[in-house]
Amino acid sequence: MLELAILGLLQESPMHGYELRKELTAKLGAIRAAISYGSLYPTLRRLQAAGWITEAAGTPASAEEVPALTSRRGRVVYKITAEGKERFGQLIAQAGPETYDDTGFGVHFAFFARTDQATRLRILEGRRRTIEERREGLRDVLGRAAERLDAYTLELQRHGLDACEREVRWLEELIANERSGRAPTVPQVGTAGGRREDNSPPPPGTSRKERP
Amino acid sequence: MLELAILGLLQESPMHGYELRKELTAKLGAIRAAISYGSLYPTLRRLQAAGWITEAAGTPASAEEVPALTSRRGRVVYKITAEGKERFGQLIAQAGPETYDDTGFGVHFAFFARTDQATRLRILEGRRRTIEERREGLRDVLGRAAERLDAYTLELQRHGLDACEREVRWLEELIANERSGRAPTVPQVGTAGGRREDNSPPPPGTSRKERP
DNA sequence: CGTGCGATGTATCGGTCCGATACATCGCGG
DNA sequence: CCGCGATGTATCGGACCGATACATCGCACG
């Protein structure tokens, strides 16, 4: 999951670890608290070893005006490679069971702007299925095993059930929107560098006309 | 977290692994999908090594009428020890940061019937604090960094924000209830075996009169 | 009558991710 | 001038998961 997220973010612009973590937190804040460095750095190493990313010599954004203050060590900037982009394309296109759990779904959804519509639909429907099953499980417990459980546990289940129902409704809306060929509200890609080369079709609706 | 959950469940009645997993799933279904055996069995081993639980020779519930069908191997039944109960008491009473994240809070909440009121209050307020911070983070992103993000990511944040607001309201209610000295609705412990010996005070409200 | 299949049941292995910790630099205010 | 908070990289042990393997039991279907 982290792999996918990193590849996705580096596709927008090269970054170093710290920056990456902040962007990750901003993008996935609704899903998970904050990515730990204990997973981030090893993953970066792994991705580099696999050849999906490389160290970029230059500073991350535009900072050539601060060339060499003392020694310039530390601050390892990573950029995605062509193989990395291909890898991202594979990961983002596949929809398995791990795509439907809370974290997996969240990460995939966060990169829906880079996912083609058919896959988006498959993922949304798979997620809905998953949540519906969870919902049924909770209803079962609340119905059949209610007297075995104390009031607090029951309250927890009720709250969970409520969240499930709400999410199913949310997904229904998204699916309907998706089928009608529109992104949720006002879509925009906003890929920083420009440079759109291989996969990842632009999102539907008002897509390619940035600043009309 | 698993440790706490296992100790809590075994306090109600002795069980073997498979059973434990089912009960765990029923009790924590609103929180996490299903506990993996890959964590359950090693944890059981760890708890046994620590002396918190022991293997019980007898069959789990009431099954003496099926004494020896062939050889009777497999089916390791665990029961909690006195030290285990003490350990559970410690774990359930402490409220740290890990008590406020999604999983930690869920597990603690599921055993609120065995938690004293002061601790319940502390945990609920800590959780509220945590969710409020997450909410503020999401609001920040939706306010300040909105134009940097695509419509899908934004939609994800909105949904997350909504969930936060809803949970804060839920917590407010629970806290108010708690302060007024009542359990959520109709409390009951329902400890199977009876046998209430050391810690874990009975829940407030209609507590000790089971079946009036 | 047997046989195969789904539920019950125990167990391990590799891998992902987290939390704590350590350490070094930079800019700023006191 | 010194400390402190932000920036920044990195490792280690541990918790938990997913896949996998394997063995038994009861029963439904041929």
Image (cartoon, coloured by chain):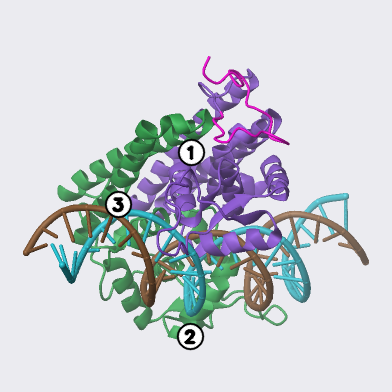
Chain colours: A green, B purple, C cyan, D brown
Residue B205 falls inside the magenta stretch = yes
Q: Name the residue under label 3.
A: A127
Residue A97 falls inside the magenta stretch = no
One can see residue A203 in this view: no
Amino acid type, residue under disc 1 in the picture: Cys
Residue range corresponding to the magenta coloring: B189-212
Residue B141's spot in the image, x, y percent? 48, 48
One can see residue A56 in this view: yes
Q: Name the residue under label 1.
A: B164
Question: Are labels 3 and 2 assigned to the same chain?
Answer: yes
Question: Are labels 1 and 2 assigned to the same chain?
Answer: no
Question: Are labels 1 and 3 assigned to the same chain?
Answer: no
Q: Which chain carries label 3?
A: A
Cα distance between the residues tagged 3 and 2: 32 Å
Quadrant in which residue A84 is drawn: bottom left
Which mark lies nearer to you, 1 or 3? 3
Cα distance between the residues tagged 1 and 2: 39 Å
Q: Which chain carries label 2?
A: A
